[in-house]
Each structure stands twice: as structure tokens, then as C-alpha cells.
Image (cartoon, rainbow, N blue to C red):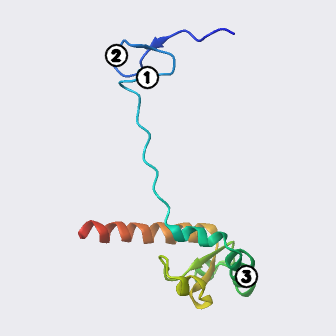
């Protein structure tokens, strides 16, 4: 089996020969992965996948946000009106659930995350 020829490091000005793009001195470091909160696993529990989520989508099959704008869009995501942040009672409370389409859910989540970053930046 033929080997790849060695080439100069991709770092500007470095002439070290390497076979994988960067020499050991200039090899980019992997970004640290964010640690997932332990409650993220709750979305895999059967109480969510088999009971709460399907029941909410049956009760409210259309996106609540789109309906406010007069558009009828099928809901695919069950969202927590108030983020539960690990509060089990808030997580399972059907009064805290709303049906949203993926676009509206992503928009709402991005807005909440931006607000949280702003609040944490002030402290």
C-alpha cells in the first residue's frame, strides 16, 4: 500500500513536513464539548416519549405561535412554556406544555438562550 507524500504544515510560515495537515506544534485543539445537563436525559424517558409528548400533540395538533399569526401549521415539537431547568414538576406539568412547529420552537429557544447569556453577562 502506497503512503501519502509528506507535505508542509498548513500553518503559515511553518516548513515542518507532516502527513495529516498540521505539525504537532500547530495542530488545532479540539473545542471543548459542552456538558449536557443531567436532566436532558428526561426527554428519553417513557413518561415523555410515550405519554406526555403524544398526549400534548393530540390535544393541540397545530403550532400555537403560528396560530397567533393566523397560519395553520402542524406542530411537531412539544415545548415547555416556562423552561423547567431540571424542575421535575415543571417538566411533567401538562399546563406548562405547548405544541409548536420546529421553526417556532427553534426561534423561541434561541431567544431564551440569548436572554440567558445576557443575564449571565451582567452578573
Q: Quickly name the residue at label 3.
A: 51
Calculate the distance from the C-alpha at mark 1 to the C-alpha at mark 2: 9 Å
For the residue labelled by badge 2, is the local secondary structure a helix, a strand or a loop?
A: loop
Seen at 73% across and 82% down, the residue is 51
Which numbered marker is on residue 22? Answer: 1
Seen at 66% across and 8% down, the residue is 2
Label located before the other in sequence (2 or 3):
2
The quadrant holding residue 105 is: bottom right
Q: Are dots 3 and 1 in contact, CB under 8 Å?
A: no
Image vertical order of residue 8 relative to residue 34, above or below: above
Label 3, residues with CA under 10 Å away: few <14, some 14-19, many ≥20: few
Left/right placement of residue 71 relative to residue 86 reads right
For the residue labelled by badge 1, is the local secondary structure a helix, a strand or a loop?
A: loop
Label located before the other in sequence (1 or 2):
2
Q: Quickly name the residue at label 2.
A: 14
Image vertical order of residue 47 relative to residue 13, above or below: below
Rendering coords of residue 5 (x, y %) = 55, 9
Amino acid at each position: 500500500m502506497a503512503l501519502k507524500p509528506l507535505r508542509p504544515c498548513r500553518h503559515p510560515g511553518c516548513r515542518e513536513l507532516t502527513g495529516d495537515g498540521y505539525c504537532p506544534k500547530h495542530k488545532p485543539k479540539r473545542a471543548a464539548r459542552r456538558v449536557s445537563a443531567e436532566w436532558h436525559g428526561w426527554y428519553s424517558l417513557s413518561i415523555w416519549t410515550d405519554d406526555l409528548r403524544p398526549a400534548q400533540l393530540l390535544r393541540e395538533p397545530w403550532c400555537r405561535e403560528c396560530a397567533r399569526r393566523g397560519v395553520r401549521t402542524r406542530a411537531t415539537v412539544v415545548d415547555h412554556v416556562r423552561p423547567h431547568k431540571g424542575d421535575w414538576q415543571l417538566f411533567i406539568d401538562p399546563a406548562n406544555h405547548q405544541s409548536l412547529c420546529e421553526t417556532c420552537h427553534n426561534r423561541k429557544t434561541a431567544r431564551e438562550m440569548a436572554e440567558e447569556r445576557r443575564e449571565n453577562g451582567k452578573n
